[in-house]
Amino acid sequence: MTVRSAWLLESGQTREDTRLAPLGAMTPADALTSRSGVLPGGTPFAASGASAMQLRITPGRAIVQGTALQGAYPVALSEAETLTFADGDPQFGRIDLVVLRVKDKVYDASAVSGAALEIIKGTPTATPAAPAVPATALPLWRVRVPTKASAGTGGITWASALDDLRTYTVAVGGILPASDLADGGHVGQVRVSAGRLQQWTGAAWQEFDLPGTIAPSTWGAWSEVTPAWRSTDGTASIGNGKLKLRYARIGRTVFGNLRLTIGSGTNPGTGSAGWFWKLPIPPYPAPETADFAAGSASAFRSGVAAYTGVAQITHATGEVYVEKDSHGFVWGNLGDVPFPNGPRAGDFLTISFCYEAAS
């Protein structure tokens, strides 16, 4: 017997049965019930054609929930089994189901207690539909049996005849595998879908509140851009200087480092220009209208001195700029004059900042 169950047979349950059956793998579905499903790991209950009318099912473990008072039945298929399908109808196609079924004579009219792989045969019609799933049965595969299918006519084309119906179950707090498409068992249950984490709200699977355009494999990875540079007095252009902004985000937190190096052909604007650089990701709207400090800045005047300042985020335009400190950092700030004779080739400015992204 290759289908083994625990706490189902009146007598004869072996120690091996108990070890193989997946005790403890229970995803809550309600106060007294668990979610029926296959346990992930390897390729449990995978299907492949064994011959024209035979389907091979690989070993696996599963939980099959009965009524609330019946409880959940742990079941294991310890060896691959081959199922034989009835020939196709002479006139119409049909749809059969492959299920893992538990029968318990204490609760049903089956007169036996045990678990087995079964084929639930559908009804041949012009528009066939899958048959109903019996109580205490876990659907695994849907099989389309064409008209007149038999060993003598070539049988079932397995490559196109199978639909995977396997749903999965895990221990409390476990993450469901990517292939699972069933409803969640409880609010807050987590699954992986297309490489993204989702949780069950009670009505739908919903992605965690993470940036939808960033794949999990790139969370925290650094990227480099040339930000737009704006001067409040005249048009700033980098010319033969250098301007780079490197940034990374984790969730909604964005980290950035900007470096501006003045070249001989750099145009910093005129007069008491204020400098602003476009942020790589729009910031979250400020709770107040005022800008806020988001990091530090330093400027090096070639051959003269170094100066420090504070990086400020302006939400209105999604930019970063520098506010001077009490030591007189006046290079490129609103309301202040530039360095004597303006920035010169070789001067550079660095800004480091961190802020909350809008989404």
Image (cartoon, rainbow, N blue to C red):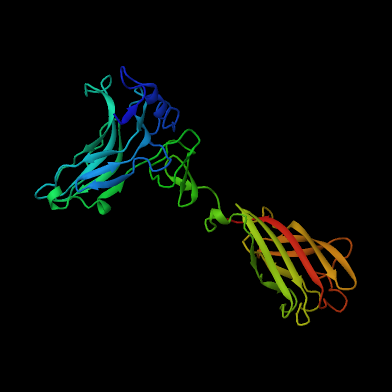
| x, y percent for residue 94 | 17, 46
Residue at screen point 47% across, 46% down: 192
Residue at screen point 22% across, 24% down: 110
| x, y percent for residue 352 | 74, 60
Specify the quadrant that holds the N terminus.
Answer: top left
Q: How many marks?
A: 0
Side (left or right) of 23 relative to 256: left
| x, y percent for residue 178 | 44, 47
Side (left or right) of 230 relative to 298: left
- 252 over 83 or under it: above or below: below
Q: Is any part of residue 333 visible from this angle?
A: no
Side (left or right) of 317 relative to 330: left
Q: In the rendered image, which quarter is residue 218 located in?
A: bottom right
Q: Looking at this view, is 55 or 339 the one in front?
A: 55
Residue at screen point 25% across, 33% down: 134
- 272 over 125 or under it: above or below: below
Q: In the rendered image, which quarter is residue 109 located in?
A: top left
Q: In the rendered image, which quarter is residue 237 located in?
A: bottom right
Q: Looking at this view, is 181 or 79 the one in front?
A: 79
